[in-house]
Amino acid sequence: MRNLLPFNKLSFHTNFSLRSPQMWFTLLLTLFLGSTSLRAQVQVEQHADTTAILIGEQIRLRLTCTLPQSQRAAFPAPQPGDTLIKGVEFVSTTPTDTVKETNSGMMKLTKYYFITSFDSALYVLPPLPVEVNGKKYFAKKNIGLKVSTVPVDTVHVDRFPGPHDVADAPFSWTWRIPAKMGLTWLLFFCFLACVIRLTNPRMWVKKVVIYPPLPPHVQALNAFQSLRGEVVSDVKAFYMKLTDALRTYLQDRLAVTAHEKTTAEICEELQALPQIKSVEEVKEILTTADLAKFAKLKVTDTVMQHNLEQAEHFVAETKPEVEPDLRPRVEFRTLSEKRQSQIRLALRIASVLLLVGSLTAAAFTWIDVWECFL
């Protein structure tokens, strides 16, 4: 086969020969211009917003890369606390800002780096690298940074002022205005309630709860129950309590004036009542009590408990068949004219005070709103 590119004798089938100086000059010029045009497509610039700071202050480095839109660039991504050089460290970075130029097909990438230093010195900040398609590009110039200390007058220390007074806190919307507005409306509504009640001609009344008295049989049974739970040490005292409860029951339930009569008179009056069937029990209780109180008869515990049971049995047989209604009764009673006048005078005074209080609270609320918004 015939070779399509015959370079057998290191020569071109052109008007130039590889050995001619004109051919070598043309090749070198073409290679130089091509590499220059490729390099000129990617430009990296680095600037600082200031070159002199105090210890602890921050400066902002702006790193800019201009490249074709078809290429990809990677900026350095240091972490807070990483050092740029010894004595200078990164504080934070910003996201990369992209601006595309539609006419030229280029784009401009910008990223900001915040750095600081805590040592006073003169630093030379090297350019940060930008990697474009695997190749690193740098800015052309370094940046000088001067870090100075804060001047302190150690000779005239008496010139330093002392501590300041407590400064007034700024206004806060947390609770003052809503609280004053709520207080204003509360006082105003109370004032309206007093005025409405004063204009109402209805008389003032008082609610009274009336509890009905306990029936005689309930009182007697309660007294007997208390005697049953006591430890008997005095026979005379026991029978006095027992007979007093029994005589009170006879007087309240059967209308027998038992406190003013003797045992014989009580039994005679009970026998005249047709509903009484156990007169002998009452007679035995009262007779034993008289002997114990006046004749100092020695009564055993068994006899005392038997008399107590007889009294309970007598009350149970003679109590009414229908239990009375023990529910409390509610009544509304009109107050006296003097009391009515006193209440109306108090309402008039309260109305005036509430009106003055509501107007005062509204004025303070308006002052706070004026100072806050106007």
Image: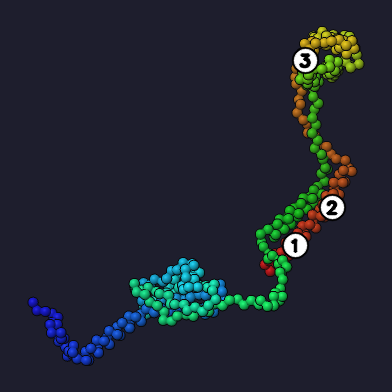
Residue corresponding to mark 1: 364
Give whichever of 200, 63 is nearer the camera: 63
Q: Please state the horizontal and vertical placement of residue 67, each as a whole percent of the image.
A: 37, 77
Callout 1: helix, strand or loop? helix
Mark 1 and mark 3: Cα distance apart in space: 75 Å
Q: Which percent across, then down, holds residue 337?
A: 88, 42
Q: Which residue is mark 2?
A: 349
Closer to the camera in the image, 256 or 148: 148
Mark 1 or 3, which is nearer the eye? Answer: 3
Q: How far apart are labels 3 and 2 at the CA level? A: 61 Å
Circle 3 is placed at which residue position? Answer: 312
Which label's residue is closer to the chain start, 3 or 2?
3
Q: Is residue 236 visible?
A: yes
Quarter of the image where one finds residue 326: top right
Q: Secondary structure at mark 2?
A: helix
Taking 250 as reference, is 115 left or right?
left
Amino acid type at mark 2: Ile
Which quarter of the figure is the N terminus placed in? bottom left
Asked whether residue 243 is in view, the answer is no
Nearer to us of marks 3 and 2 is 3
Q: Is residue 76 above or below residue 272?
A: below
Q: CA distance from mark 1 to mark 2?
A: 23 Å
